[in-house]
Amino acid sequence: MPVLGPESTTQVPPRRWTIDPGQSQVGFSVRHLMVATVRGGFTRFEGALETDAAGLAKISGVVDTASIDTGEPTRDERLRAPEFLDAERNPEIRFASRRIEPDATGTLRVVGDLTIGGVTCELTLRALARDHSAGADRLQVEARGEISRSEFGLGWEDTLEAAGALVGDRVRIALDVVAYAADPWPSTSA
């Protein structure tokens, strides 16, 4: 599986790719009670990638806020509530890349706008893009980043008596997506 990036010898044609939710994951993790880590994700999302002659050129996606799933239904309902994600009034979380830059380590630096609850902040992701099939029909992208809950106005500012945070401010994001070619190959016949 060749990696698409600054040292790549794989040529992927310019085209649009559609993220396959059935083979992809949009996940997160956050510290809880200063000792545990809560992991979760979203079960409904869609997105697109674009490639150009240099490799991965754009990433965009939309997540259905109400589809949050941490494996604990009571916690999920609280996360959907007005004091946190307010899923009824803010049904979508959106990301759109502004630029994708290769770095010296062979990974990509994806800089874009993340919008949660009507608040937009810059998000930087470190990503690897892999070509599953010599550019023919599938790409895989793994991206990692971190946000601050407080920058987005996400609630739960409760603290423990020992002066520690009930829920950590830093939320790690993990995207593992597979995308399929969304447009046909250009005809090579004359």
Image (cartoon, helix red, strand yellow):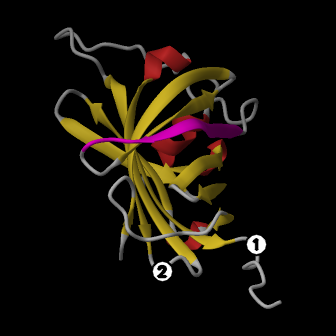
41 relative position to 113: left or right: left
What residue is shown with label 1?
183
Is residue 93 located in the magenta-colored stretch of the structure? yes
Is residue 146 located in the magenta-colored stretch of the structure? no
Instruction: Tell me what residue is drawn at x 61 percent, y 69 percent.
Output: 13
40 relative position to 183: left or right: left
Residue 43's place in the image compared with 23, above or below, is: above
The magenta segment is 92-104
Residue 39's place in the image compared with 134, above or below, is: above
* Secondary structure beneath label 1: loop
Q: CA distance from mark 1 to mark 2?
A: 16 Å
User: Mark 2 belongs to which amino acid?
Assistant: Ala
Q: Position of residue 106 (x, y in %)?
A: 29, 51
64 relative position to 70: left or right: right
Instruction: Tell me what residue is drawn at x 74 percent, y 86 percent.
Output: 188
Q: Is residue 44 visible?
A: no
Q: Position of residue 86 (x, y in %)?
A: 65, 29
Instruction: Tell me what residue is drawn at x 72 percent, y 70 percent.
Output: 182
- Count of numbered badges drawn on the protein: 2
Q: Is residue 176 visible?
A: yes
What residue is shown with label 2?
134
Extreme residue in the bottom direction: 189
Quadrant in which the C terminus appears: bottom right
Quadrant in which the N terminus appears: bottom left
* Secondary structure beneath label 2: loop
User: Mark 1 belongs to which amino acid?
Assistant: Asp
* Image-quadrant location for residue 157: top left
